[in-house]
Amino acid sequence: MTRVAIVDGVRTPFAKAGTALLNVSAQELGRVAVRELIERTELDPSSIDEVIMGNVAQPLEATNIARVIALTAGTPHSISAHTVTRNCASGLQAITEGFELIRANQVHTVIAGGTESMSNIPLLFPKAMNHFLGNLWAAKSLYKKWMAISKFRPRFLKPVIGLVEGLKDPFCGLNMGQTAEILAKEFQISRKEQDKFALQSHQKAVVATQSGRFAQEIVPVFVSDTLEPIQNDVGPRENQTLDALAKLPPLFDRRHGTVTVGNSCPITDGAAAVLLMSEARVRVIGIQPLAWIRSYSFAGLDPRRMGLGPAVAAPSALRKAGISMKEIGLVEINEAFAAQVLAVLRIFQNPKLGESEGANAPELSEIDPAKLNVNGGAIALGHPVGTSGTRITLTLAKEMRIRNVGLGLAALCVGGGQGGAIVLEQA
């Protein structure tokens, strides 16, 4: 089967929900990323075979958001597009679907990515209000309308918060923060250890921003009510301290918990896109890609321990690539929660700890902290759920080029009890 290259990629700045990108829709964020990718690579839009975008919230006004993004980004009407969702791994799912299409010689050029505006996830009426409005609209006579109105109750106006519902697992009934608390207790991860990890995430992200490292992958976003574009991530804190983090109360288990807003990823808006090409197309065009996709894998586990997803998916991805962790030079693990990443690191160091989830694999070994999330992670940058799988893959590919690293691994946990991992090889 043909090899598949990541030619280049781009992302928007990431911004905490309700801040800088509040008034920018998910489809507009995706359009900005895809259009910039086409411009940077000087790609003829008519040469694109497929556009694939990951998205979780699925805006009602932009169903099949990938198609909306493709058309507004300037691709011809003849270019098809489809949307994928795998919760937090939706952006990675888009890449792997493009990979499979190219590897099977169905297509040669794919734009894959993810987009999410968590600011714009709607409030919903409860079912009782839906029934009330339905009966009111169906009433034909004035009397029947009055009878319908008489049945209104103030509780009908209590909203269902879409974001809260979306971050709760429908199988085990826990929200994602509660699953992180389970791992913190199971793996005896202290509050201080979590806060220290969170601080390091901010420190590394600040350095990556100030050095211009992130500028290589970020396209500024113009917001209609501002004169200056949003150019940097809204999240990394230059003045973050351990003392400030220590003062934050536990959020998900207020009496005995250790997971806080400070050692968790913020709810975030942002988009990212990468250009995938077959080896044959790369050779014909004569371009130097960032990396080759060596392998990938998705795996399932207990939804209550969903944070261990990277440790479950990575062994299979490494096995398919024919390598072990000792050969990996850089690692990106999405930082949903500090406790979650630290639990994953414990399993990599001692695979027997993950035996109950099938993570006891000879391919795993301890991850050198100097190789992990070298530019910070989602605790500082944020986690726009449909986008992060693309973001960590893009960041990994670019950093491998900068540091001349041969092999890299990107992995993330997935709400609902899954994990995803991808292995890249420098081109």
Image (cartoon, rainbow, N blue to C red):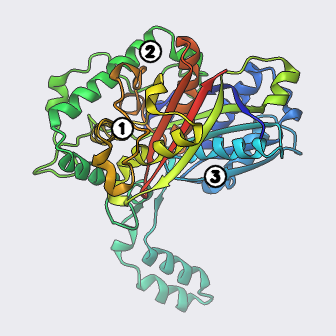
Tell me which residue sits at (59%, 15%) in the image: 401
Tell me which residue sits at (37%, 41%) in the image: 336
**Callout 2: few (<14), some (14-19), or many (20+) C-alpha neighbours within 10 Å?**
some
Query: How far is the residue under mark 3 from the one under mark 1?
Result: 23 Å
Q: Amino acid at mark 2?
A: Ala
**Callout 1: few (<14), some (14-19), or many (20+) C-alpha neighbours within 10 Å?**
many
Mark found first going from the N terminus, 3 or 1: 3
Mark found first going from the N terminus, 1 or 2: 2
Counting from the top left corner in percent of width and height, residue 410 is at: 50, 34
Q: Amino acid at mark 3?
A: Val
Describe the element under mark 2 as helix, strand or loop: helix
Q: Amino acid at mark 1?
A: Cys
Residue receiving disc 1 = 265
Tell me: 179 left or right of 214: left
Give whichever of 268, 158 is nearer the camera: 268
Give whichever of 87, 99 is nearer the camera: 99
Q: Which quadrant of the rendered structure holds the N terminus?
A: top right
**Callout 3: few (<14), some (14-19), or many (20+) C-alpha neighbours within 10 Å?**
many
Counting from the top left corner in percent of width and height, residue 201 is at: 34, 25
Tell me: 2 left or right of 189: right
The answer to whether 103 is drawn above or below residue 396 in the figure is: below
Describe the element under mark 1 as helix, strand or loop: loop
Q: Are marks 3 and 2 in contact (CB under 8 Å)?
A: no
The answer to whether 415 is drawn above or below residue 320 in the figure is: below
Residue receiving disc 2 = 208
